[in-house]
Image (cartoon, rainbow, N blue to C red):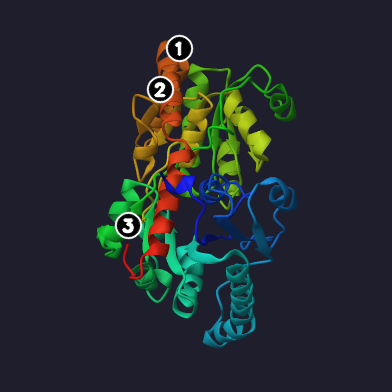
Amino acid sequence: MTARDLMPEGGCLMVASIFTPIQGGSATVYANLCRYAPAGSMVALATRRHYETGAEIPGWREHDAVCGFPVHRLDLLRPQVMPPPANKLVSAWRYLTIDIPLRLKVIRTVWGLIRKHNIRVICIGELASMAWLAEFFRRVAGTRMVLYVHGEEVTQRLDAGSFGRQRAAHLQAADAVVAVSRFTERALAEQMGVAPERICLIENGVDTRRFSPGPDDAALRARFGLQGKRLVVAVGRLVPRKGFDKTIEAWSRVCQAHPDAHLVIVGDGPQRPELQARAEASGVAGSITFTGSVDDAGLLAAYRSASLFVMPNRTMPDGDTEGFGLVFLEANACGRAVIGGRAGGAVEAVRDGVSGLLVNGESVEEIGSAIIRILGDDVLRGALEAGALRHAQVNSWTNRVGIFQDLCRTLQNKGEKHV
């Protein structure tokens, strides 16, 4: 009998500012840990506004009404991103007038959730900004502390005096640290000194009930004027490590080989103005579309309408990299071959030659050649699509959630700190 067959003695509180309906790998991971868990075992604490912009998260009320698990929301769980303080006096003023009042509000809220839902484990989805919360309640309430780590939080080099030198201390304070890939597991042990026995490997899975093969979506094509095009779809937050810039650089060559090809970039982020400028300068801007953020139905439609999925991720000079790459599995679950970068955890998400192809994410030539090859070889594409479906089906969320629930139960039943 597994943890999924038993009602838990105490619940787990998932704390994350990035949570559905915000799109993105980590938001999806945390929601699926709650959605697939036994009834009563998971509660989420999330936000109504995005900490980067302060804007209200579209659709959060509708999401929470039908998601199937309790979600409690505050406006923010961490201070909204602001320009760097001009001096130490401004920094101290912000801490006294913004950080401390917000922390006190979060603490009061979590106290109430602990009592209401019998919370025994607090899982933090943001090492940088929220580890303090689990440490506080570990000391004052005896709840267990789990940190969920995707990879870039520990591989990225940060300036001296920043959170960079606090990461190891937070990780050492945790009862357990979840790694989403073997790449992340190694980084935790080798770069942060986390004892291997305290790391729980839970590789990202895919929601095969939500992502599945289906018909090409005429409404999506009509909305963005994509009729008669062979779509190469890219999905993700528009940041440099995703490799969308290199894909755009390679696109003129793709268009020469396949004039009916059209690149569709789904998502938003700080790099969008730069990417749009690159597209305009490429000479093939008419065959590149930026959709911005789309809802769940739009995302599924994009995957299903694609001839190929591409995200040639790479490791940035500061160490920022892809911890896993859940979008690869989502595209696979829709029966689509993928192209990913040979960097970070993507080498685990993509089975090279089986569910897709891996390339050097720094090489425009390799990226372009891989796209041209798959679009031009129906036999290869068909074999990769069949392999993609098999790969997704063996990586569903069902068993991943079982591992997490077993971890929570072990922590609840153990009196000592270590797993």
- Identify residue for label 3: 199
Query: In terms of sequence position, does the residue under pointer 3 or pointer 1 come before the other?
Result: 3
Residue 408 image offset from top left, x and y in percent = 43, 58
Left or right, residue 39 beside residue 59: left
Amino acid of disc 3: Ile
Residue 395 image offset from top left, x and y in percent = 43, 35
Label 3, label 1: how many angstroms apart (C-alpha)?
42 Å
Left or right, residue 154 beside residue 375: left
Q: Nearer the viewer, residue 390 or 58?
A: 390
CB under 8 Å between callouts 3 and 1? Answer: no
Label 2, label 3: how many angstroms apart (C-alpha)?
30 Å
Residue 168's quadrant in the figure?
A: bottom left
Q: Is residue 259 above or below residue 346?
A: above
Q: Nearer the viewer, residue 292 or 215?
A: 215
Q: Residue furthest bottom?
A: 89
Residue 83 image offset from top left, x and y in percent = 59, 71
- Identify residue for label 1: 378
Residue 223 image offset from top left, x and y in percent = 74, 29
Which quadrant of the rendered structure holds the N terminus?
top left
Amino acid of disc 1: Asp
Mark 2 against mark 1, which lies toward the viewer? 2
Mark 1 crowdedness (10 Å alpha carbons): few <14, some 14-19, many ≥20 = few
Mark 3 against mark 1, which lies toward the viewer? 3
Residue visible at 69% across and 55% down in the picture: 57
Amino acid of disc 2: Gly
Q: Label 3, secondary structure: give it.
A: strand
Q: Is residue 222 above or below residue 30?
A: above
Mark 3 crowdedness (10 Å alpha carbons): few <14, some 14-19, many ≥20 = many
Q: Label 2, secondary structure: give it.
A: helix
